[in-house]
Amino acid sequence: MSRILILGAAPLPFEPRERQYAPNLRTWHFTKPLIGDGHEIRLVAGRVPNTYPDDVDPVIQQSDRGFEYVSVAGSLFQNEVFLKQHYDEFQPDAILGVNTHPSSRVVSIDTDKPIWCDLNGWVMAEAQAKCRVYGNDRYLSHFWKMEREILDRADVISTVSEAQAFATVGELATRGRLGKETFGYNFVHTIPNAISEVAFQHNSRVIRGVLAPEGAFVVLWAGGYNTWTDVDLLFDALTAAMEEISDLHFVSTGGVIEGHDEVTFNRFLKRIRSSEFSDRFHLAGWVPTADVPSYYLESDIGINVDSDNYETVFGARNRLNEWLKVGLPVLTTAGTEISRIIADNDLGLSCPTGDTAAFAQRLIWAARNRTNLKKTAEKAQVFAQEQFSYGRTTEPLREWAQSPTRAPDKAIRVEFDDVDFYSEQPEKVDLERRLMVAREQLVELEAEHNETRHQLGLIHQSKMWRIWMFTIAVRRWLLRPFGVFRKASK
């Protein structure tokens, strides 16, 4: 077994904190299977803003049978000396960073131990979306600094989708990591989001008879409204569906993502306030984590709406996984890998990104076909339990953890020179190019030589060749008495 230091995000899903975000879920998703496999784990987790009370201790440490959990304030998580102290004290065999920001902290530690970095979503696509919302391209530099440092040092990288894996391989190429030393080496593994293993319970009434009528058809949104959320489609489709279905009510948990996107949700809120159906929009805000399952279990359908952008192509959606787990029917715009899995396997409803009319029509169909909708959700629940468990999704990580190793290049990047082998200027043609041309010509000549020998061999084995040789021999025998073949005398 291995000693593994993990840097991730706090709070963990089982903690009684106010909010849970994707990085928190991902941290426990990666950690729990490693504990189960018997590895010694120390998890140092930086707290996501607005998840702990202001007066809580900056460091909370607990341990249980080979698992040490250290929840730390954000400022400490940024402190390289603090992280190095945990590394020196724990003396790990390997280090794992879960999510992009913790992974960027991992590679700041001075160590020659193997490092696995998880990139939970492609931050450069997320950066582009934020640039668009805030009208400022400076965010690209902030996110690229984190991504670049990880690409230059990580021995293994995991992504949340196959599409992101391809993007990451491309990034590795630009950083000089795809050289002769790493040919054939699998740098990148896809680990899709898993369904949570935390039990969901209905603790109290939160929607029916509280926000919406008992018999309402409840459409649920859960979580933050991020830079890639198409709130215009969301509002227009809901309004169109409300015109057709008189008992359709929209309930939303979550809202503004403080410090990241404080624009998108407020634009949605502004449109709701001017709507004739504003009394059927119920915005519960950020609710305690313990209450979230009750919202799932009291709803008729969960919806996800993404705009057409690169984050959608490369990213994932935890809310969809959670709804599959609990058996809540889903309707999502297509684009993310999980949305395509849902569509391809008939696990829910989907429609193209940007198609307001199609989204509205599917909502209307769902409200009128509630029994069929529930049967599809039950099928999806079985599928998710089989395909998206913690253990199954983390198989590549668990295998690596048995015997962690460095990448073949030991993070020594190939430096790119300003070389142009196709230059037509003789003075720029160096010896290496001439040798390459000579080798290519030699290979071609050798191939031609081998082909000629092969063809001659076929000719010598043919019946026509034997007949021709026999004819020559007979001709020589018949003409011999006449001296035709005798050498001329001097």
Image: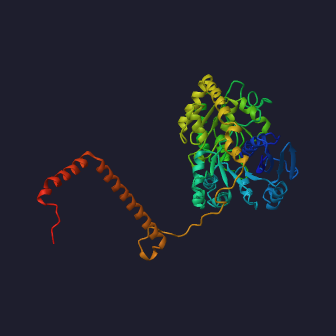
Horizontal relation, residue 404 to residue 237: left or right: right
Depicted 101 relative to depicted 303: above or below: below
For the question of whether residue 250 can be seen, the reply is: no
Horizontal relation, residue 86 to residue 180: left or right: right
Q: Could you say where residue 89 lies in the image, as x and y percent from the top left?
A: 85, 56
Q: Could you say where residue 355 lies in the image, as x and y percent from the top left?
A: 53, 39
Depicted 174 relative to depicted 209: above or below: below
How does the figure colour the protein chain or chains? Answer: rainbow
The one nearer the camera, 39 or 331, is: 39
For the question of whether residue 90 can be seen, the reply is: yes
Q: In which quarter of the image is residue 301?
A: top right
The one nearer the camera, 284 or 392, is: 392
Horizontal relation, residue 337 to residue 101: left or right: left
Number of labels in the image equals 0
Depicted 361 relative to depicted 87: above or below: above
The one nearer the camera, 398 or 201, is: 398
Instruction: Give the residue displayed 74% in from the left and 28% down from the top.
Output: 208
Instruction: Give the residue displayed 65% in from the left and 26% down from the top.
Output: 378
Q: Could you say where residue 249 lies in the image, as x and y percent from the top left?
A: 66, 31
Q: Could you say where residue 358 lies in the image, as x and y percent from the top left?
A: 53, 35
Horizontal relation, residue 220 to residue 198: left or right: left
Instruction: Give the residue displayed 46% in from the left and 69% down from the top.
Output: 435
The one nearer the camera, 217 or 489, is: 489
